[in-house]
Image (cartoon, coloured by chain):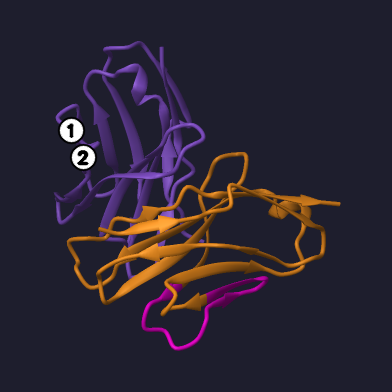
Chain colours: A orange, B purple
Amino acid sequence: AQKITQTQPGMFVQEKEAVTLDCTYDTSDPSYGLFWYKQPSSGEMIFLIYQGSYDQQNATEGRYSLNFQKARKSANLVISASQLGDSAMYFCAMRNVMDTGRRALTFGSGTRLQVQP
Amino acid sequence: EPEVTQTPSHQVTQMGQEVILRCVPISNHLYFYWYRQILGQKVEFLVSFYNNEISEKSEIFDDQFSVERPDGSNFTLKIRSTKLEDSAMYFCASSGDVAGYTFGSGTRLTVV
C-alpha cells in the first residue's frame, strides 16, 4: 500500500520569500511518480509538478521545484518568490507507474499555505 | 490547453435520490478516474476506467456507485441512492502518459 504524509497542516510565508512544503511517502513499488497539486479556495485541482522515481534530476517548473530525496522518501515542494496568489491548499500525491492496472493517485492530507504581504 | 470538463458545478439532491455526475475527459486520454473530497479532508480515489471497464476501485466505490462511458466523449458517475455522507466535491480526471494526470474543476454535491 502507498502512503503520503504531509505533517504541516498550515504554513505562513512572507511575500517574495521562498517556502518549503514537506511530503514524505511510503511505498513498496520500485517505480512510482510523485505529484504536487494546488487547490485554491475555488476548489479546482491544479497540477504543479511531477517527479519520477528514476529521474536523475529534481523536477522544476518555473517557481516550483521538487526536492526529491529518494533514500529519505521525501518529495518536498519549494516555492520561490512567493506571491499572494500562491495562498492555497497544496497536496502531495503519488502513484505506481509500472502496473497499468494501478494508476490511482494516493493523496496526502494537504498543507494550507498563506502568503502574507 | 486541453481540459477536463465537469457538469454541473454544483448539485443539490434529496437523500435517497439518484444523481449522475458528468465529465468530458481530454480527448486523447485513455484512462479516466473519479475522486471525491469531503469538505476539509483529503482527496480520495473512487474508481478508474480503461478500455470500457473498471480497472481499479477503492473500498468507497460500493454497489451504490457505477460508472459509464455512454459515448466517445462522456464519462459519468452515478450514485443510485444518495446518503448525507455522499456530500462532497467529486473530481473527474483523465490521464495519457505517466505524468499527464489532469483534473476537472469538480462537482460539489450536496445531499439534503
In the image, residue A53 lies in the stretch drawn in magenta: yes
Of the pair B63 and B19, the residue shown nearer to us:
B63
Co-location on one chain, circles 2 and 1: yes
Q: Between tags 2 and 1, which lies in front?
A: 2
Of the pair B58 and A1, the residue shown nearer to us:
A1
Of the pair B66 and A98, the residue shown nearer to us:
A98
Could you classify mark 2 by the number of other residues whose Cα lies within 10 Å: few (under 14), some (14-19), or many (20 or more)?
few
Residue A99 location (% of width, % of height): 19, 68
- Tell me the quarter of the picture where residue A73 sits: bottom left
For disc 2, the marked residue is: B59
For disc 1, the marked residue is: B62
Residue at x-position 26% and y-position 12%? B16
Label 2 is placed on what type of residue?
A: Glu
Residue A73 to residue B17: above or below = below
In the image, residue A59 lies in the stretch drawn in magenta: yes
Residue at x-position 21% and y-position 60%? A102
Residues under labels 2 and 1: Cα distance? 7 Å
Give left or right: position of B22 versus A112.
left
Residue B10 location (% of width, % of height): 48, 27
Tag 1 secondary structure: loop
Label 1 is placed on what type of residue?
A: Asp
Give left or right: position of B50 versus B6.
left
Residue B39 to residue A63: above or below = above
The answer to whether residue B26 is seen in the rendering is no
Residues under numbered marks 2 and 1 in contact, where contact means CB atoms less than 8 Å apart: yes
Residue B53 location (% of width, % of height): 13, 49
Residue at x-position 43% and y-position 51%? B103
Tag 2 secondary structure: loop
Residue B20 to residue B45: above or below = above
Give left or right: position of A17 versus B57.
right
Magenta stretch: give its range: A51-67
